[in-house]
Image (cartoon, grey):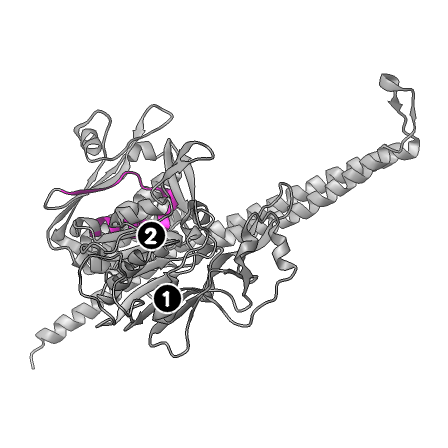
Amino acid sequence: MFGATQSKRLYTVGGLLLLGVLLLAVNAVADRLLSGMRIDLTSNNLYTLAEGTKEVLADIEEPLNLYYFYSEAAASGIPQINSHGRRVREVLEEFNAIAGDKLRLQIIDPEPFSDAEDRAVELGIEPLPLDNSNSLYFGLAGTNAVGERQVIRYFQPNRATLLEYDLSKLVYQLAHPKKPVVGLMTKLPLAGGYMPQTRQPMPPWFIHQRVSELFDLQNVDTEGGKIPSDVDVLMVVHPSGLSDGALYAVDQYVLNGGKLVAFLDPFAETSPGDRSSSLDKLLAAWGIEYDTSQVVGDPGQAIAIAVEPNQPPVYHLALIGVTGENINGDDVITRGMSSVNLGFSGSFLARDGAELEFTPLLQSSPGASPLAADRMENLRDPSILQTDFTPGQQSLVLAARVSGKLKSAFPDGAPEEVEDGAEHVSEAAQLANLVLVGDTDFMTDRYWVQFQNLLGQRLPIPFANNADFVVNTLDNMLGSNALINIRSRADYVRPFDKVLQLRREADAKFRIKEQELQAKLRNTESKLQEFQTVGEGENRQLILSAEQQQALLNYQEEKLRIRKQLRDVRHQLDKDIEALGTTLKFVNILLIPLLLSLLVVVIAVTRSSARNGTHATP
C-alpha cells in the first residue's frame, strides 16, 4: 500500500495533469468557438486600425503585392529591431486580413546568398551591415498591376508611432499611381542650392522630399502670368517681390476654382533676398489683413534656446511652439497634432464685414503681442525682447483656412504685362478655398526634424508636426482625407509604469544619500586644507592632530554606514519589484487562462442552449 506522502504526490501530479489536459481542451475549443473574434485590450488600441487605414484598404481596385523582407536570425540579437519587426508583421497581417484578396502579402526571410536575398536587392531593400559581417534586411516592397513599385528600404524603430501611416501611405501610392500635381512657386531654396558663404552646395530641405514622395512637385515661374492648367494645388512659399503679372496669375487661378496654400513671412531667416513676403494686394481684396512689419511674440509658447555655452537657456518670444488647444483639433488638417514649431511668424485677421469663412488652424496663446520685425535682424540676445514686452489680451491667428466667394484684386482686368488672352474673372463663381500660413522658416529642418546615423543610414527623427501640417494641408486641398485621418499611433513599447515608479522612488532616496555623502566629503576636504603643514614643496607633509584623526575616522565610519543604507534601499527595491513580478506571473500564467476558460464555457453553453432551442419540438 502507498503511504500518505506518496498518495499526496499522486494526487498532486494527477491534478496537474488534469489541469494541463483541461487547458489544452479549452484551447482547442476556444480555437473553434472564438475563431475570427478579436479583442484589443491594449492601452492605446494598438491593434485596432484607424478608420483612415480601412478607407485606404477598401479603396484598392486591383490586387497589390507586398513583400516583407525580414532577417529574423540576424535581428534576434538586437532587441529594439526584433520587437519592431514583430510589430511590423502584425500590422501587415492585419492589413491583409481586412483587404483580403486585394492585398497579397509575402513574408520573406532572405538568407545570405539566396534567391530571396537577390530578390530583396532587386526590389530596392537596402541591407544593413552588422558587426559579424552579416547583413540585416528589414524593409517592405510593394508592386501594383501596372508594375510600379513603392519601397520602405528600412523600418526605422524610431518611427514606430508612424508605422500605420507609413504602411497606409505605401498602399495608397500603389493604389493611386498617378500623383496629383502640386505647383511650387517660391524664391526660397527648398530644393537645395549653392551657399556663397561656404562655396558649398546646400542640400534640399527634408520637407521638400516629403512632399515630393506624395505629389508630383512642379516648379511654377514666379514671374509668369498664368498657372499651368495641370496644377491641382498651388503652393506659394515666400512670394517676395512678385510682379503684378504673377499676382494676377494667382488671383485668377483661385477665382477659377484653383486651390491655394500660401506660406508668407514677415521675417524669413532663410531668404537669400527680401526678408518679408506677402500677397498683400490679393489679401486686401479678399478681406484679410497681414502686417509684414510685425512678428508674433508669444510668452506662453516661447521656445527656450541656448545662447551661450554653459549658460541656462533663454526663452525666445518670437520662436513659438504651438501646442494643446492652440492647435485646432476639430479641423482635419490639424487633428491629432501635438506640436508645430514656428519662427518669426506673422498673424492674420479677417476684416469686419468680409464675406468669407475664416477658420484658425494655429493660434498663439492669449498673452501674445506683436513685435517689430526689424528687431529680429542680428538679434544676439533674445532675452532683451522681454524687457519692454507688453502682453496682449487675445490669441493671434498664425495659420487659417479661408473660404468664400472672393473678388479679384484686379477689377479693371489683366495688367498690361499679361498677354495670355484668357477671359478675366472678376468674382469667384463658387467658394474659393485657400490656406494661409504666417511663416516659412518652420519648413527648415532645424524646426522639426533631427537626423541619426544608424548603420550607415541617415534616418530622420521628427520632433514636431511641421511636415505633417504641410502634407495634410495639401492632401486636404486635393480632397484626400483618408491618410490625414490616420493619426500617429502611440508607441507600442510600453514601460512597466509600476516598476519605473519603484525605481524613481529608490533613485530619489539614493540621490539624497549621495548628496549627503558628497556634502560631508566636501566639508572634510575643506577642513583638511586648514590643517597645519610643515616643510615646503615636495617635503610638505600633512600633520593631523588626535582630534582631527578621530574626525576623519568618524567620517569613514559614517561613509560605511551610508553605503550600507544605500544597499538596503537597493535591496528593498529588488524585493518590491520581485513581489510585483510574482503577482504578474500569477495573473498571466493562472488567472488569465482560467478567465478565458470560463469565457469559453459560457460561450459553449450559450451556443448549445441556442441550438437546443432551435431544434426543440413545439
Residue placed at 55% from the left, 65% from the top?
A: 369
Q: Going 59% across and 67% down the picture, which residue do you hit?
A: 391
Q: Is residue 550 above or below residue 16?
A: above
Q: Is residue 163 visible?
A: yes
**153 in the magenta segment:** yes
Q: Which mark is residue 283?
A: 1
Quick check: 118 left or right of 485?
left
Residue at left 54%, top 55%?
Answer: 374
In the current view of this chain or complex, which residue is farthest to the front?
A: 416
Q: Residues within 10 Å of mark 2 (few under 14, many from 20)?
A: few
Residue 511, position as x, y percentages in the image: 66, 46
Q: Position of residue 475 (x, y in %)?
A: 27, 58
- In x, y percent, where is residue 3? 40, 46
Q: How many marks?
A: 2
Which badge, 1 or 2, is on the more N-terminal residue?
A: 2
Q: Is residue 267 magenta?
A: no
Residue numbers of the magenta segment: 148-172
SS at circle 1: helix
Residue 72 in the image: x percent, y percent?
A: 29, 35
| Outermost top residue | 539
Q: Is residue 330 visible?
A: no
Q: What is the secondary structure assignment of the residue under circle 2?
A: helix
